[in-house]
Every structure is written in C-alpha cells, then in structure tokens.
Image (cartoon, helix red, strand yellow):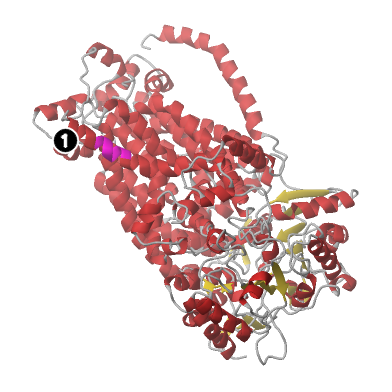
Amino acid sequence: MRDMSTSRRLGERRRPLAILAATGLAVCMAAIGGSITSAVPAQASSTPIVVWIDAARMLQVKAYEKANPSVKLDVVTFDAGANGSGSIESKVSLFNRVGHGWPDIVFSAEANDVQKLGVAPFNFPTVLNQGLVPSSVTNNYAAGTLSPCYIGGKLECLRNDVAFDVLWVNVPLMKEFGYTVPTTWQQWQAIGESVAKNHPGYIVGSIGDDFDDEIYLQAAQCPINDEINSYTLLDNPANRNCVAMANLLDPLQKDGALSPSYVFASTYGKQYGVSSSYPNGHVLLMPGPAWYSGAIFCGTCELSELKGTIAAYPPLQWEGSPKTWTGDVGGGLWIMSSHTTDPQAVAKVLVGLATSTVSQDQSEGYPGYVPAAKSWIAEQDASGFWAAPLAPAFAQAASEVWPGWTETPWDTIGIWTDSVLPNLTAGDSVSSQLSVLGAAISNYAQSDGFTVVTKA
Amino acid sequence: MAHVTAQPTRRQPAARAPLAVAAGPTRRRRRLLSRSVGVRLAWFIVMLAFTAFFIVPVIWVFIAPTKTDHQLIYWNPLAFGSFHTFLRTWDEIYAFQAHELLVWLWNSARYSVGGVLLALGCAVPAGYGLALTEFIGRRVLLSITLIVMIMPASALVLPLFLEMNLLHLSNSAWSVVFPFGFFPFGVYLSYIFFSSTIPKELLAAARVDGCSEWGVFRHVALPLARPVVALVGFFAFVSDWTNFFLPFVMFYTDRQYPLPVGLDYLISSTSAFNPVTSAANSPVVRPELAMATLVAIAPVFIVFLFAQRALVTGMLAGATKE
Amino acid sequence: MSGTTSLPVPVRTQGRAGSGRAGGRHRAGYAFVALYLVLLLLFGVLPSVYAVYLSFTKAAGKRVSLGPITVAQWAGLSNFFATGRDFRFLPAFEHIGVYLTIWLVVLVVLVLALALLLHGGVRRAVPFFRFLFYLPGALAGSASVLVWAFMLDPDISPWHFVLSLLHYSSMPQTLAPGHLPAIFALIAFWTGAGGWIVVMNGALNNISDEVIDSAKIDGADAWQLAVRIKLPLIKRWVIFMVILAFAAGTQLFVEPQLLSAASLGMVSPSWSPNQLAYYLATQNGNFNYAAAISVDLLIVGLMAATLLVFRSKMFQID
C-alpha cells in the first residue's frame, strides 16, 4: 500500500480481473434487463388486441380465443379494481399523462367503475351506442342491467354478469319446521322472530356483510344513493322506506335471527355450515346475491350444503308495494378504450366476450345478456344440485333491480363496510346507522363534486 | 467551511486492522456482567418470549401449506398437516396461470441483484466521500439525502412514471433497477460507518506516502469496508426484494411483476380475500397463498443466513470477532 | 463517534480548499459522490421538486407556456386548503397522532432494550436470536396479509389465548376502530424492529472493549454500563433511527393497506394521511391533491429531522 511500485504491479495483475469483471457485469445486465423492448403495447390493427382481465375471467377469454382463432388477443391479468383498489383509474391517469399505453379492452370487477372512468380526468371508455354496438345486442339485456354503463344517454360499457339478490331457501329445514316460503319482507320477518324463539341457532339472513346495504336498503327502495340529475344526489336516510326496513331488521338483529358475522369470515362455515348436529346447516333462509350459488351454497363451498337442499326463490316484496324490487351486489363490466386505432374490430371482440355463449358459458356469474343467460342457467340446473331449478327466480329477479340505487363514483359497499359495520359489530342497531351511512355517502359525494339534496 | 474552524477534537476510534495485529491476541471478551445462573436464565426467558412473538407467525407460514384450506380453519393453528398435502399445494400454486409464480420469482431476482449492485457501487463510495473527503456542499448533500428520504412515495408516482417514460424505459426492468440503485439509507449507513470507523491518521499516512485519493479509497478504506459492504448490500437486497410500490407503478403487465406485486394480485384473485368477484372454485386458496408467501420470503432468509457472518461483527472494522 | 482514546489528528493542517493537495481531495470528493449525485438528482430531487410543483399548480385548467415548456396554472395554496377541508383529512391526522405516540415509544424503547440485551448477553446465543428477530422483516407488505388475517382472527389464530384474554371473539372485534393504532404499531414493530436491532447491535459492537472494560473496572453495573456508556456512544444511530421512525410513522401506509386487504375492507382506505394522498392520486386521478398532502407530511418530517439533526450536531464529522 505504501509502495507505489507494488501497487503498479498489483494493477497489472488486476487487468485481466477487470476484463472478467466487465464481462460478468455485461452478462448480468443482459439477464437483468431482459428485453427492454418488452414495453408499450402497440395500437395498430395488425397487432394483437390488448385485453386486461382478472384471473376469474381467464376461462371466458380462453374459450373465446379458441372459438375465434383468427382474432389475436394479448391478455394481461390484473386485479380488475377488486375491493375498490382503483387500479384501472390509476393506470389510466398515468397513461393519459404520457399519451400511450392504454389497453383496448378492460374488464372491471367494480360495477361503478364506468361512472368514474367516463368523466374527467379519466375520460377513458368509448361510447358504444353510437354505431359500435348494434341495438340488437343492447336490447337483449334484461331491463336495467345496463344502467351502470350509462352516462347521460351514452352507453359506455357492456355488462358481463349481473348479481341481483334472490331469496335462498333451505327446503328440508323449512319443511322440518313447518314454514311456508315467504313472499314478502314482513312474512320473512315473522319467520325470523319465530325461528329466534323456537329454533335458536338457525338464521334467516346475515347482517354482518360488506354489502348488506345493497341487499336490504336497495330492496326497500331507500333513497340514500340516488343520482337524480347529473351531479345531484338524493340522500335521505330519514325517508320512510329506509326507516321501515331498518325497523324490520332491528328485532331480528337483536334476537340473533340474523347472523352478525360476514358470510365470508374465515369461520362462517364452522359456525353456520353443515355439521353433525346440524345435518342441513344453520341457514334456513337467506336473502342474497345470485352468485351465492357458487360462493357459499355449493357442495364444496364453505357452508357445504348438501345436494337437493337449497333452492332460489324470487326476491321478497314489500307488503303493499305494487312492484317487487331487489338489490344487486356487483357484476362486472367490459369497457372499451376510446384510444383504440381500430374501434370496429375491438368492438366486435368486446361484444363477443360480453354476449357470446361460448364466452358466457364460462362466466362466474349469471350473464347479463339474456340469450347467454338462458344457456348458462340451463347448465347450472342440469347439474341437479339445487332443490329446484334456479332459472325462474333468476330470470324474474334480473329485471327487478331497483334503479334508484345508482352506481356512482364512490363505492357504497366500501362506505358501509368502514363506516357502519364496525358499529354494528359493537352492538348498535341498524336504525341507528342510517344517518351514519347517509352522512358518509354525503361526504364522499360532495368530495366528488356532487350536490347533495334530501328532497327530489 | 465551518469545520475548518477549531472544534473540540472528537474522540477517534482506536486504529484497527493494521495496528490491531500489533495489539496482539489479548483482547478481552465481553461477558455477561454477572455470571449467575439466575441472570442467565432470566435473559433466556426474555429472549425466548420475544422470539416467540417474532417467530410464531413465521412458523405458521411454514406449516400452513401442509394443510388443506379446511384443515387450516378447523384444526389447531400450529398443527402440522402432511407432506402429501404440501406437495399438492405446491402443484396448485405452480400451475397458477402457467407457472406465473416462478416468473415473478425470476423477476424479483434480477431486479434485486441489479438494484443491489448499482446501490453498492453508488452508496459505498458516496458514503466514503461524504465522510472522509472534503468538498463544498458536503453538508448540503447530506441534508438533501435526508430530505429526499422523507418525501412520501405517493407524491412520486407521477414524476417517476413520467421520467421513465421520457427515457423510454416504462414497463421494463430498468425502470425499477435504476431507482433501486438510489439507496440513500445505504449512503447514510456508509457515511456513518466511514466517519466512525476509519481513523483519519490512516488516510493521512497513505496520502503522505503519495497515494492518490482513489488509491487511498481502494487500498486503505475498501479493505476495511467489508462490513459496511455486507450491511449495505444486505439492506439494499431486502429493500429491493420487498419493494412493492415502485414496481406497482412502473409495470402494467403481470409477466413483469416481482413477487410483492404478484402476491398482491394473487390475493385479489382468491375467494378468501376477494369473495365477491374472484373465481368461486379457484384451486388457489389460503394454503396456496401461504406457499406463495414462502417462495417470496425464502430468499431473504437464505441471504440473511449467509450475511450473518458479515453482520455478526456488525460495523466492526477489519478483524472478525465471532 | 464511537469513542475510544483519542489521538490528535494532524489532518487539519494539510492545506485549504482549492490549493494543491487539498484541492485534489476536493475534486476527488466529487468523483466519489458523482454516481450517487446522478441518481439522487434523477430519483430523489427531480421527482420531489416535481411533486412540490404539482402541489402548487392546478390539476385542470389552462396550461401556461414559459418559453420552451408549458406549465400548469398556478394554484397558490388552494390545493392545500382543498385537501385540508376534505372530510378525511383531520381524522387521518388524528389517527397518525395516536399511532406515532405508541409507535415511537414502543420502537425506541424495545429496540434499544433488545439491542443492549443482545450486546451484553450470552455470546453464543446472540446470532441465533438476532437472526430470529429479523425474520419477520422478510414479510413486508403483501406477504403478510395472509399472516395477519390469521393472527388477528381469534377463531384461527395461534395467539388465540391472548385475544380471548382481551375478550375479542371475532376479527371485527379485534379490529374495532379504537384498537387500530395499537395494532398497526404492533405490525410495524413486528416487521421493522429486527432490522433496527441489527443496526443498533452493529453500532454497539463497534464500541471498543477498552471503554467497556474500563467502565467495569470503575464499578459500573449492567444498568449504568448500558445507560451511561453504551447509549451515549451510539447516540448518532439512535437519532438516525428516531428521525426515520418519525418520518415513517407520519407516512404510515403499508400496515393499514394490508390490514384493509386482510379484513376485507374493515379498515378505511384513507385511514392515514399518506393513504388519503394515494387514494386521491389513484382513485380520483388528482395528483395535485396527493402532492399537497405529501408536502404537508414532508414538512412535518423535516421539522422533526431538522430539530434532531441540529440539536445532535449529527452532520459534523469533526
């Protein structure tokens, strides 16, 4: 170290070492970098159509690709905005800033995504009902199922599946206890009170879920999230519909006829599923979305219901109301980008994914497109698992979703979950939470630039 | 230039490596002050209690893939399942979307290795320069480093994305490797190490002997810097391997994801954490998630095992002591 | 900084900046930091400056051209006022206030206690325990979602007996809003303490034996040795840790996000200010509001850092 001549000699010895190091570094960099050109997907019509989906739609897209080998798709998977993550919005705003990178078709798992994406600063979807999608397609959707896709009069997406609420019924248990299947909410409440008194341990529904506002309040026509005009929200938690439904639920919540747990809690199956002392489970009745068929009631699902025990009945009606209304929980959207260079070709793929039987037969949920839905439900019923065919109740409920609970840029499920649910867990009644929910929705609405009114 | 004025001389650490040889083998060992059995026992009890706190969840992650989803809920949380189930769990997660887990693993490896090499090449000389050379703006640089470390990441989403796009690097590996090379925490570690462990006399002596500044660094400081290279390299590796935010912003195709982003995507596709929109009968449930978590954390464990030897001596310059 | 017997340093007499030898040292100094300077500029300074620029300009509105570049319209403090009035802003800062109090105390006290215990402990066992304490650091972010979904659910957690002692019988009860700051501090400690213990242990190892032995000869017991000798010698490291822990605490993001995923949404996506900033950037596409909140957090962190750095003279090397 102190001898410069030594260090010079050391330097010479180090030269081959340096060359080796440089080579090694080059090899490393090649491995690290992979292909730098793996970046931005191009938009020209001769290149593949870029489709962003979540893992659950993979089967649909694969089936479509197989049936249409001439169509080249570049499939990318992501979370599709699940649980309100906003991934579509965040990517679109970044792409908007640099002017490229948007996918051609995006699947969104959030039913309200188009309401966000269709306005500033995103302005992402393209308008479909001005020539890209024929009315022969849009007319074949059940009434109201395309409403989450409309902004003003413009259709900006196609619905993939719909998630209306029906009444799930445990047929052998109803027979065992001697009840008849209720057709109104009031009858349902009476059964609940009777169950709490005479058959404790059994339940007629759940009040611990993330989406209970869209099971009970929407069905009651509670005007707490009603976009009556552009950027004007009607939010009246004191409306008699809201109060009446809350009053109906309170005693059931108190007696334990409604389970306080979230149906997707880890131990829900342990608590309410089939066991040796409860060979048909604990669930007597349950108002809930159509996709419970695959999520909790199937044989291998967490409630482990037995074959032939569960049936779906049409949604409950409010006594004295002229029409039956029900809620809906979810349902995915197919969105087409307004930045594509070949809209006709992309629109064709969009329609195929959303409505073709080959794609929709693989759908996780009940298709929104009626002809595809008929085929889908026939397959479900053919399995023979259900106590009675699901088709009649499903077909009826599909057009009974109350449109007064509008899809808005904010997520009402998320708001219920973090504003109301902790209080219900702590023991507060549903009635006490109406104003809490109303206030929270009002805050989000105003933050998004809406005017909130309490009278239409 | 404030440091040129008289300052109370800071205590200098005793000269290490070359002089330590002369100091001989009579270094006294640290011991527990009291060798009573009671104190030792108490020490072990306290240590084991904290160990349980830190380790029980990790043990759980190792055991979880040996059980089925049903067993995971119904059995005792720390009960062992079966090796057969473990293999089946591996098959399921391996098959997910054409072995995507392994693609993510490979991505994590190359981004992290690249990031660590760049961070070392950058932070070690910088820390040395800040600690042991003088130049105008030294303190400013240190202050800016600290400030930049405190800037919340959510504000940097857009500017980083714009920058990478300007450089035509978006969605490529370099869009994360270059930012990974920027490791201010490593610069601070290096700065504090060099300023407290390398005695100035050593450098002064080397300079007096005619070494250039680069020579001083290479022949005096670097050989003594093995501990800080290990420390900075290790922390850079863990930081890069577990970084979620940067790759999440930079990549928009799943084949480019490293493990943290891939794992986040995996979580959103299982019914356990996304019951509303995920595939109801996906074979990927909680044990498979645990298996994916194992794949994500195993390399860190392995690197730490190997880094232990270097970390054992911590910042002790030169001689290994364990 | 780790004190031992001091030797007078002749370095100072070797010239002034710009002349001869010292000038060469100056230029060499720049060479050593050159690569770091480039990266600092690219990934530290420029994005931060851009973020500050975003916070003072309007999201929408006319673009103004200043010569070759176009800049957005000046917004003054309107972004700051608008975010300050957001209904989630004040609650988020309240949450952080409670969290920081718990977090800083727990982190500093326990990390130093464990580092000291390791330093003075049974020699052979120390690497073993240090390794085990560090392991959770590998489970950062998404890797620990599954873990905490189980640890905090009394029905399926290995810590079942602890949770039942606290009378929590379901996960929603564990995650009652009042418990959240403590739970986040717990998770952050579990993940981060090991790393700091490694750093502090390393700093303690750097204290030469002579100092310790001479203190023992002077009759110091374990407590005095720890508090009077060891801690002051690693003061710089402790300050560094407190600054970073404070900044990291005010910018809490990962723990509430992962717990939100683990609990299927029971934790609000804008519980902490940093989450709110992220929410505004991603969900609303409003990068300017996000930048404003980030600047708020930066100022808070800077005030603490400046205070600590100047009081401890951390940047002086001589």
Magenta residue check for C120: no
Depth check: C36 or A428 in front?
A: A428
Classify 10 Å Cα crowding around label 1: few (below 14), some (14-19), many (20 and above).
Answer: some
Give the main secondary structure, helix, strand or loop, of the magenta stretch. helix
Which chain is disc 1 placed on?
A: C
Depth check: A185 or B241 in front?
A: A185
Residue drawn at x 59%, y 88% as measured from the top left: A241
Residue C198, quarter of the rendered image: top left
Relative horizontal placement of residue A424, taking residue C245 as reference (left or right): right
The image shows residue B169 at horizontal and vertical percentages of 66, 42
The image shows residue C1 at horizontal and vertical percentages of 26, 33
Regarding mark 1 in the picture, which secondary structure is present there?
Answer: helix
- As drawn, A272 above or below C112: below
- As drawn, A178 above or below C145: below
Residue drawn at x 16%, y 30% as measured from the top left: B36
Give the quadrant of the C terminus of chain A. Answer: bottom right
The image shows residue B300 at horizontal and vertical percentages of 49, 35
Depth check: C57 or B257 in front?
A: B257
- Residue that lies at the very extreme toward the left in this rendered image: C218
Give the quadrant of the N terminus of chain A. Answer: top left
> How many numbered circles are shown?
1
The image shows residue B163 at horizontal and vertical percentages of 60, 48
Question: What stretch of residues is rendered in magenta?
Answer: B43-48
Callout 1, which amino acid? Ala
Residue B278, quarter of the rendered image: bottom right
Please indicate, yes or no, whether residue B5 appears anywhere in the rendered image: no
Depth check: B100 or B175 in front?
A: B100
Relative horizontal placement of residue A86, taking residue A343 as reference (left or right): left
Q: Mark 1 highlights which residue?
A: C222
